[in-house]
Image (spheres, rainbow, N blue to C red):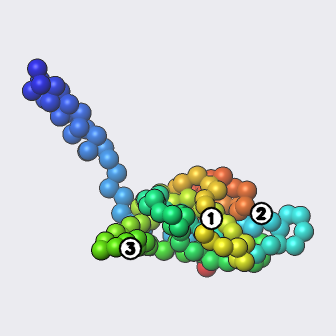
Amino acid sequence: MRLRRLIAISPLMLAVVSCSSSLEPKSDVTLLVTNGSCDPGPCRAQQVLAFPSNQPNTPGGDWFVDLGTMTGPQLCVTIPISATFVVSGPGETTKFVWNTAKPVALGVEAPSESRFEASPSTSAFVPATAAGWSITLPGGGQAVQGPACTP
């Protein structure tokens, strides 16, 4: 009985593996961020942060990649192809590696704010699936695919 179940599951597993994506990390992916604080009134500076999906559970808050400071109505940045976060403890070091083929979510903080409690405010997306992305922050819930912008 056990062997029969294994044989029945094996073709299913083979189908899942053969249909899975082999997306490779992609460089030169851009993100066009529209500053949602500009309407109405003067634009407030916003620090744009990317939060990789492979978050370690640390007391120091979420791991993020600083994409840049938006001071005007829009900011175009190139999303780095990869980033590494290192957690060190007594006699132990663990590296968490993220790349553009893995999901990432976005958030903003005022440049004067502490990043200790920074967190994402958008849904995750996989940067390597398009040449360019756009979103309004704060306020946008999902980045959308679009043409690449020029940083």
Q: Which residue is mark 2?
A: 36
Q: Is residue 91 left or right of residue 96?
A: left
N-terminal label among 3 and 1: 3
Name the residue type under label 1.
Answer: Glu
Q: What residue is drawn where x is 53% and y is 67%? A: 60
Q: What residue is drawn where x is 66% and y is 73%? A: 114
Secondary-structure class at tag 3: strand
Q: Is residue 69 left or right of residue 23?
A: right
Image quarter of residue 128: bottom left
Kindly report the distance in space between the C-alpha atoms of the residues bearing marks 2 and 1: 21 Å
Asked if the residues shown at circle 3 and circle 1 are in contact, with their CB atoms under 8 angstroms apart, the answer is: no
Residue 8: % across, % down: 17, 27
Q: Which residue is mark 3?
A: 88
Name the residue nearer the viewer: 73 or 68. 68
Residue 18: % across, % down: 26, 45
Name the residue type under label 2.
Answer: Gly
Q: Is residue 17 left or right of residue 132?
A: left
Name the residue type under label 3.
Answer: Ser
Residue 110: % across, % down: 72, 72
Label 1 CA crowd tier, 10 Å (few <14, some 14–19, many 20+): few
Q: Which residue is mark 1?
A: 117
